[in-house]
Image (cartoon, rainbow, N blue to C red):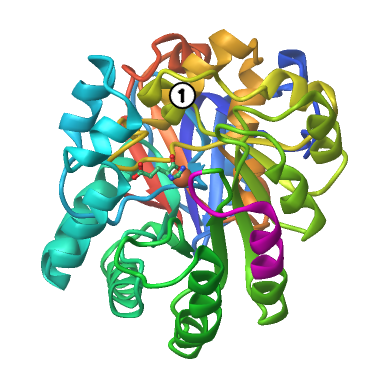
Amino acid sequence: MKLIGPFSQLISLDNLPIRGAIADSQLSIITDGGIVTNNGVIEKIGNFQTLKHEFPNAEIDWIKDTKIVLPAMVDCHTHICFGGNRANDFAMRNAGKTYLEIATSGGGIWSSVQHTRNASDEELLQLLLQRIDKLLHLGCTTIEIKSGYGLNLDSELKMLRVIQKAKKLTKATLVPTCLSAHLKPKDFEGSSKEYLQYILDEILPAVQSEKLADRVDIFIEKSAFQPEESHYFLLKAKEMGFQITVHADQFTPGSSRIAVEVGALSADHLEATSNGDIDFLAQSNTVAVALPGASIGLGEPFSPARKILDANGILAIATDWNPGSAPMGNLIAEASILATYQKLSTAEVWAGITFRAAKALNLEDRGVLAKGKKADFVVYNTDNFQNILYQQGELRPSMVYIDGNRLD
Ligand code: NIG
Ligand code: FE
C-alpha cells in the first residue's frame, strides 16, 4: 500500500459523462489531494491528511512543492513504428507542391513503406522505443500503434512483431492495430479488392495465430479503399474476431457511416464529415477521434469536435503521430490548439485524451483517478491545472506514474 501526495490540486475526471458536452464547472478539484495505490491499482483518492490517518501503514511517496495531478493520457491513434523521415514532403507541401508531385519525387506513404521494409528489426525497434519514450515523458502511458508501412505479409508481420517486442521493453501499455489496409502497395499485382482479400486470406490469419494484434484498421478514401469493398472487408475481419477502427472522412465524407454500421470502436479523422453523418456517428457507441496533428501537419480543417459533442457524441483526441501527415506527436499541444479552434472546454479536452480515448481502445480500466483503476497519472509542477492547456504543450509533466510507480 502506498500513499502519494500531497498534491495542491487533484483532478480525478471521475463521474464525468462518457458522451456529450462537459462544462468546466462539472470538474471536481480536490485540494491537498492524495492517492492510495495497491499493486498498481488505485485504492482511494481524497484529502491527503485524511488518507494518512485512514491508511497509517501505507508507505508515503512525498510530493514536494506545488504540484497537480491528473490521469495519464491515452494516445489512441498513432503510426510510430516506421523507418525514414518525410521532412521533404512537409517542405514541398508548404511550398505549394501537389500530392502527385510529392509522390513522384519519392515522397508520400510509399516512401515510408520502402524505408520501413528496408529497416532491420533492431533499427525499427530502437526508433519505436525512442518515440514511445517521448510520448511517455509527455504523459501518455497508453499508446495505440498501427502497422501499415509494411503492406505485404512479411513486412506487416515484421512491424507487428517489433511492436510486440517493444511491449516487453517499455512500461507503457501498447495497443497494436493491423493497418495492412492503409494503401494498396505499388508492387501488388491486382485490384484493391484483391489486395483486401489477400489481407483477409494471408495476413490476418497469421496476425491472429501469432497473437500480434486484435484490432483491424482501414483507410477508406478516394485515394485508398472504396466504401463497398471496405464494408465487406471490415465485416469479414469482424467475423474473424477482430475489433474494428477506421480512418474515416479525412478528405471526403461517407466512411464514418460505414464505421458505425460495422460497429467499429472508433472512427478517426472526420475532417470532412457531413452534418448528417455527425449526427449518425454521435448517436452511436463508436468513438469519434479527432486528430488535430493531421490538420496542423497538412493545413487542413479541424475535425468538427464541437458539433460532435453538441450532438452527444463520444469525442476522443489523439496525435495520429506519423512521418507524413502528423509529424509533431505532442498530444497536449495538439489538443489545446484544437480547443482554440473548436471551442472545447478544458474538461472536454481532458476527457478526450483520457477516459474517452481509453474507450476507443476498449479499455475500461484507466483514464480516471478512481478506486480500481490503473494507477497511471501525470504530475505537473504548477499551481493551476488550466496552465497545462494554456501553455499549449510547453508545460511538460514533471513526473509520470505507471502502476503507482514513478517513471525515471
Ligand atoms: O492517418 N490517412 C492516412 N494515413 C495517415 C497518414 C500516413 C502517412 O502519411 O504516412 C494518417 O494521416
Ligand atoms: Fe492515422
Dominant secondary structure of the residues highlighted in magenta in the image: helix
Looking at the rendered structure, the kind of residue marked 1 is Ser
> Residue 121's x, y, as percent?
17, 72
Q: Position of residue 203 (x, y in %)?
A: 45, 80
Tag 1 residue? 295
Please name whichever residue, 347 or 405, is drawn nearer the observer in this view of the structure: 347
Give the x, y percent position of residue 120: 12, 70
- Magenta residues (range): 223-234
Q: Residue at x 36, y 70 (%)?
A: 188
Q: Residue at x 76, y 16 (%)?
A: 23
Q: Quadrant of residue 85?
A: top left
Horizontal side of 154 relative to 37 (left or right) equals left
341 within the magenta span: no
Q: Is residue 63 left or right of residue 52?
A: left
Q: Is 389 on the left or on the right of 107, as rendered?
A: right
Q: Which of the 4 image quarters holds residue 238?
A: bottom right
Q: Residue at x 85, y 26 (%)?
A: 311
Residue at 31% x, 76% y: name it: 161
- Is residue 85 rendered to the left or right of residue 81? left
Q: Ligand 1 appears in which quadrant?
A: top left
Can residue 366 be seen here? The reply is no
In the displayed structure, 162 sits above or below 220; it is below
Q: Secondary structure at mark 1?
A: helix
- Callout 1: CB less than 8 Å from ligand 1: no
How packed is label 1: few (under 14 Cα within 10 Å), some, or many (20 or more)? many
